Amino acid sequence: METKKGLVFFMEDDGEIRKKYSEFLEKNGFVVRESCNGKEGCCCLKAAQKSTVFPEVIIMDLIMPKMDAIDVLKRIKKHEGCNTIPVIVLSESESKEDKEYVLSMGADEFLLKSELTPEILMDAIKKATTSVV
């Protein structure tokens, strides 16, 4: 299994958020593969499995059309190769229960969109990817 340094899968149905943070990540040396829903994101993961080139980190919205973050997390954690990829979940929900549930399902970070800045996202990526080593 090869983890491509700097490859990020970003699953977010809000086009403005996806564009803003994808552009920021690209300016900071990352290669970003975007998906507008969880089902599309899972297709990217299947392609990664076939090529054996996996992302360094997955960033995804909690609530997405076609497949939400919980369903995507379940699939990620079941598949060898994908199950060690750090996952950062973004959410508008300030519910402590939502955060605890997402983390218990295997996410490495849970970030509130209302508090999200490029710097916070970058710190979360660094934290998630250094804990994998």
Image (cartoon, rainbow, N blue to C red):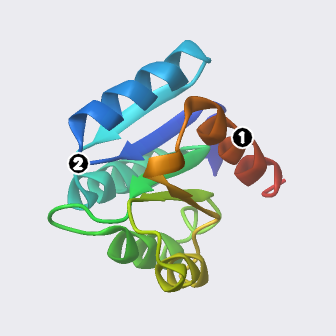
Determine which of the numbered discs, if any, sits on residue 123 in the image.
1
* Residue 50 placement (x, y as % from top left): 41, 51
Q: Earlier in the sequence, mark 2 or mark 1?
A: 2
Q: Total label count?
A: 2
- The reply, left or right, for residue 2 in relation to residue 26 is right
Q: Is residue 59 above or below residue 92?
A: above
Determine the CA span between mark 2 and mark 1: 22 Å
**Residue at position x 59%, y 84% in the image:** 104
Asked whether the viewer can see residue 52, the reply is no
Asked if disc 2 and disc 1 are in contact, CB closer than 8 Å, the reply is no
**Residue at position x 47%, y 69% in the image:** 94
* Residue 46 placement (x, y as % from top left): 35, 56
Dot 2 falls on a residue whose secondary structure is: loop
Q: Are there few (<14), some (14-19), or many (20+) residues within 10 Å of tag 1? A: few
Residue bearing mark 2: 13
Q: Nearer the viewer, residue 93 or 126?
A: 93
- The reply, left or right, for residue 84 in relation to residue 25 is right
**Residue at position x 77%, y 49% in the image:** 127
Q: What amino acid type should be assigned to the residue bearing mark 2?
A: Asp
Determine which of the numbered discs, if any, sits on residue 109 in the image.
none
Asked whether the viewer can see residue 86, the reply is yes
- The reply, left or right, for residue 124 in relation to residue 93 is right
* Residue 124 placement (x, y as % from top left): 68, 47
Dot 1 falls on a residue whose secondary structure is: helix
- The reply, left or right, for residue 57 in relation to residue 43 is right
Q: Residue furthest left?
A: 66
* Residue 130 placement (x, y as % from top left): 82, 48
